[in-house]
Image (cartoon, rainbow, N blue to C red):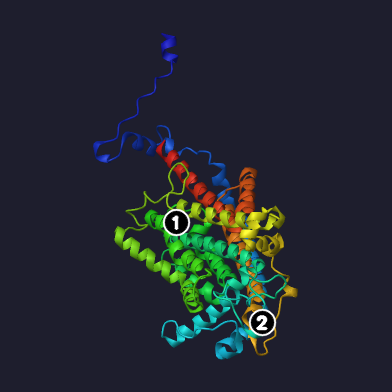
Amino acid sequence: MANKKNKPPSPSPSPSPPPSAGLAPSTWANAHGRGTPSPDTRPRRTSLIAQLQMRRSSGFLGFAGKALAICLLLLFLSTGAYGGMITGFTNGFFAALTRIKTDPSVVRGYEPKEEFTGVKAVDQVLVTLVTFFAAWLDAGGPVEGTTWEEETWEGPWLEGLVKGKEGMQRGRTWDVDVPLWMAMVQFAGAWALVSVEGARRGNQGRVVGWTGFWGIGMQLLSYTIAGPIYFIIYLVTSPVASGSDVDALVVDGREMAMLPVCVTMAFIVPAFMMGLPSMPQAEHQNWIATWQVFPILQANLIFFLKSLCGSSGAGAEGRNSSRVTNRGKAAGASPVYQFTMSLCVVAQLAFLTIALIPPTALPESLAASYPWLSTMLREVSIGSALPRALWNAPSTDTASPIWIAYLAPLAKHFLQWDVYSGNFALLTWAAYQYWAAGVGGFKRFGKALGWFVLGGPISTAAYLLWERDEAVIEREDERGRRRSR
């Protein structure tokens, strides 16, 4: 009997919630201090990527990282602007172009076209831009056995380059031509990446989403000035730059599938045509003018193709289909990344092949049949791709007459500093987004270095942006798995 009295009473069962409470039994019990917490409320360990992203996108570390990226962008802007724009004013290049524009009779070896659209204001801009690129592309040479003063030019315009006599002064040489075409292809890849970022959902309605406007700015102000300005505004205003918002990354998958075709049609085809040797000079200038407006051509092509395929956007209806899949692949942007990396790798490997093969390696029969191959291998070296020092820029005399061929080295100096500075600015912009998303590791660093060797800074930037996409989506997939437990 005593033991029964001392036995502790058994706990009474938890009362059920009254029918009018409107709460599930577990919720009512938790509200009254009974029961165990819901599994969703238990603290769970976040992934390393998520931890790094939170540290890098907020607080002092986030501020310092963004400030460093902006300082580097300003450095590339200043360097490229000095090597291109400022040097162009001091070495006689812009003065020569202005004289040719105002008085076409002063130029030799080139007949400038003065009307393209019939709109005077537009034509004046196009004449300046076309003459600029003609300094590179129209700088041929005289017929063998004649002198520059005799003004006997072999047509079409590239014949002076291909059949130029050994030791004869020529403007457009393979040393000018080959590295500039590599730079042109890399610029096409850079433009493709900018087009992707402008089309993301997080950038719609923002100034960084107006890629057509910025593309025209790159043509008028130069890539090395308009590009870094765009990248700085992007890092400051775009939600994509934080690397934390998966919804901001969403793109229209069909538009991304169309983009490589549109870049090819609007950018690469006109660039290829303006470099062909077998056409009259006036027609050649038309293609140069067409290439100048490639951002407008691309915007119209995308609009036309999307109209044919039906309306679709990165809105609520396309939210799931245009996101990165749970396997970590960029469902929307991956075709553009692949296109850009392939384009840049082909261009850089082609240049390295030409630069590293000695002319003596050509079989005699091949060298006899195609003598321009020997000339190209002899003139092009690794140094051809390196711009001249800022303090050692080429210059020209603007006194009459102005030989268009003498302007080719000046055009090369401008374009190399312009494109290279712009490309490294884009690489800095991509590297910051990669870093802010919490991505890292020596393995990825090794891959990035490999892409740099194979395809240059633009190929590396495409790889980093692709890794950024995968990291953001991997983190979002992990959050979804935790919520579903």
Task: Please tell me in which quadrant of the rendered image residue 398 appears.
Answer: bottom right
Q: Residue at x 44, y 82 (%)?
A: 116
Regarding residue 20, the answer to whether it shows in the image is yes
Between 271 and 462, the residue placed more toward the observer is 271
For residue 460, above or below residue 299: above
For residue 270, above or below residue 445: below
Regarding residue 432, the answer to whether it shows in the image is no
Residue tagged 1: 248
Between 222 and 485, the residue placed more toward the observer is 222
The numbered dot on residue 141 is none
Between 115 and 376, the residue placed more toward the observer is 376
Neighbourhood count class around disc 2 (C-alpha, 10 Å): few under 14, some 14–19, many 20 upward = some
Q: Tag 1, which secondary structure?
A: helix
Q: Residue at x 54, y 41 (%)?
A: 47
Residue tagged 2: 148
Neighbourhood count class around disc 1 (C-alpha, 10 Å): few under 14, some 14–19, many 20 upward = many
Give the x, y percent position of residue 17.
29, 35
Mark 2 to mark 1: distance in Å? 59 Å
